Structures are given as C-alpha cells and as structure tokens.
Amino acid sequence: MSPSESTATTTPEAIPTTAPRRAWWVIVCLTLLNSIGMTVVFPVLPFVTLEYVPEGSLALWVGVLESVNALCAFLVAPLLGGLSDRVGRRPVLILSAFGAAASYALFGVGGALWVLVAARALQGLAAGDMPAIFAYVADITPAKDRTKRYGLLGALTGVGMMIGPAIGGALSKVSLDAPVYATALVAVLVGVVSVFALPESLAPGNRTAKLKLEELHPFKVLKDAFARTELRVLLVGFTLVSIPFYFYANNLSVLGHDSVGWGPSQVGLLLSAAGVLDIVVQGGLLALLLPRIGERGVVVSGIVAQAVGCGGLAVVALWFGAPQLLAVAALLFASGQGAMTAALDGLMSNAVGADEQGWLAGGVSSIGSAIQMTAPLLAGWLYASTGHATPYALGFAMIVAAAVLLFRAVGSPARRPAMDQTNEAVQSAMRSTGDLRD
C-alpha cells in the first residue's frame, strides 16, 4: 500500500496485540536515555571541533557540522519511517541506536576534520529513533490518550536536556573526548534495552505490504503528506510555528548579549528555567488541560503564548532592553511551544491510519530537519543585516498565520478519518477484556 492511500476497513486482527503492558515504560526509559545521551556532548562539541579548525572559523564549522547532520536526517527520515511501517518499530530503534553509537565513537576518535564531518553525517543517517518512538506510541495508545503521552515524552526530553549537559560538563574535566564516548555508551545501552526488553508494537495486520523506495524520497513524502486534506492544515501550522522556534532557540544567547548584556551563565540559567517549565507544562499541566479545553484549546493556548513571547522578544530587541521582559518572553515562548507541539503530534497521529504512523513520523521529522537546516541561517542573516528585531517580527507574523489556520481547522471530531474511529472503538472493546496495554 502506498503511504498516500488509506485503508478502507480495520478489523480486530489489525489491532496490535504483541506489546505487553511494560512497553510504555520501556519507551519512557528509552526516551529519557536518548535525550540524556544526545545532550551530554553539547558542552564539548565546539571544543572538540576547535582542535581541527582555526578559532576564527569555529562558528562556521560548528554550523557546517550541524547542517550536515540535519541534511542527512532530512534525507533518511522518510525511509526509516517507511521501514518501520514495513518491518516494525523495534528493528528501526535498534538500528538507530547502534548507528548513533558508532557515529559518536567515530567523532571521539577524530584525527581529522573530515572524520568529524563523516561522524555527524552518520549520526544523521541513523536518526530514526524519535520517529520510531512517535509511531510506537501511536501503536500502543488509544487515540484519545496520544496527546497526553506525547506531552509526557516531551517532558522527559526536557529532563534529559537538564541532566545531559551537566554530565557532559563534569566529564569534560576528565577529557574533552570523555563526554563523546559516554554518549556512545548510552546509545549502546539504548540498543541493548531495545533488543532485550522492548516488544514489537506493530502487528502484522497493520504493516504495509511492500516498501516502495520511490514513495520514500523526502520530497515525495512531503508532497504526499501536504496533499492529504486531513493533514495539510496541521502540517502547514506545524511548519509556521517551528520556524520561529528555531529562530528563538538559535539566537537567544546573541539577543541576550546584545540587548541586556547577558553572558553564558545568565543565558544558561534561563534555558534551565525553560527546561523546568517545559517539564511542568508537558509532564503535568497538559494532563489537566486536555480534559477541560481539549486538544484544540491546548493548540490555541500554546500559539497565543508563543505569539506573546515572540512579540516580547521583538520589543526587547527593538526598544526595551529589560532583562525581566526578555526572561518572561522567552519562558512564555518555550512553554507555549511544548504544549502546542504535543497537541499537534496527537492530532496528526489521529489523522492517519495504523499502517501509516511511521510514514507520518518520518515526514514530520523531515520537515523538522529541513527547518533546522535553514532557520538558524535565516535568523542569523536577518539579525545581522536587517535589524535585531526582524527575526522575531517575522516569527510573530508566522505564528499569527498559524493561529488563523489552526483555529479554523483543529478540534472537530468529525474530521477524524472513519478508520481511526473504527480503530478506537475496537481498542475500547479489547481494553475491556484486558488485551490492550495501558
């Protein structure tokens, strides 16, 4: 079946029954390990790179390394997503984990600049873990609970991003390579856990019959995804709010330095506060809001918070260099983005069939990688050439446009495909007999 085609009917045999109740908790552990592992290296990557390049070109080469990583992830994400729809989520998670371990080990060995570039390319090519986890959660979770679980995974990512850099900073006192090798060991641990503790979630009845490589070209996947009426508005909204987020994430330290005279310690404290707030919002507040205001309310509230935060950053850059305003605006932006993204993930997952979750996750990952390649460069160019407030003014306009689109399209149960309604009904019946996981 082509990813662009929908399954007409869903039978009870198509409901996954291979994952026991422990599957969710294994996924929780894997998500936390992944987020810790990939952030352990953050404090030392520039310094490792500095061993091979002149100091004056360090920023350029750090950008090149990250762009190469994002480019490879963009190219391979649809393939890994489609592969998980064909052979299951578990093999893709195992492949990604050991591929990441090899890439970080290669980066630690180093020896030449081209080795670092090759290592970052390999890491990008192995970046199928989060799309596979996205699809895995959709496999084992009823449609009505997916947003809550995506929010919990987002909160765990925030926990990892608080713990990982601290571990990396401590290990850097041993040597610059120690955090890199530690990340490789964490990736090996993820692979071992996936091999021995993680059951397969995708039942044979929900797998695609054939993997067509021509259908998995990244641009073809994006074209097919945006052509789907049930996905188009959600994906456009996701794109419009993701670009300003990367403006914010990659330019905040520069804005803090230029506008209010902050150094690394103040920016680091602000980012830590944003991580704590993200944990609170996605790990606790989201579960309270969903029953009361629904996914549509969460999306709209998150976008409003992002718009206010982005507008505040523009004001700081243009007129009012107040540290308090910068902090409040940045925290509003971060908290709104986390909640809104979790809700959008749930809505997009519910808009496609059980045999398309990997395809969708790969497409969304490709969009994120494409934005990650281009948005930081665009933000830097606009900031330097047209004014410090320009990236945030443009981001504010994009967020407002996303709000208009999503407010009109999100939240109507009637928009859910009939297959998913049938699928959820079957899941409810099976839960009553104890066959489906929590």
Image (cartoon, grey):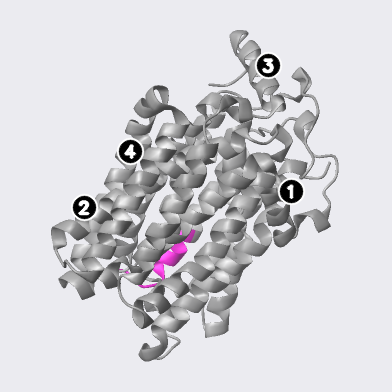
In this rendering, would 32 be left or right of 134?
left
Query: Residue 30: percent from the left, percent from the top?
Result: 50, 43
Looking at the image, which is closer to me, 290 or 359? 290
In this rendering, would 50 be left or right of 30?
left
Q: Residues within 10 Å of mark 2 (few under 14, many from 20)?
A: some
| Residue on which disc 4 sits | 281
- Whether residues under marks 1 and 4 lie with C-beta atoms below 8 angstroms apart, the answer is no
Looking at the image, which is closer to me, 281 or 94? 281
Q: Which amino acid does the dot numbered 4 rest on?
A: Val
Foreground tag (3 vs 1)? 3
Foreground tag (1 vs 4)? 4
Q: Which amino acid does the dot numbered 3 rest on?
A: Val
Q: What stretch is highlighted in magenta?
A: 173-183
Secondary structure state at the residue bearing disc 3 = helix
Spatial CA span between label 3 and label 4 = 31 Å
Q: Is residue 45 visible?
A: yes
Query: Residue 165: percent from the left, percent from the top?
Result: 33, 59
- Kindly identify which numbered label has been placed on residue 83: 1
| Residue on which disc 2 sits | 328
Mark 4 / mark 2, whichever is N-terminal:
4
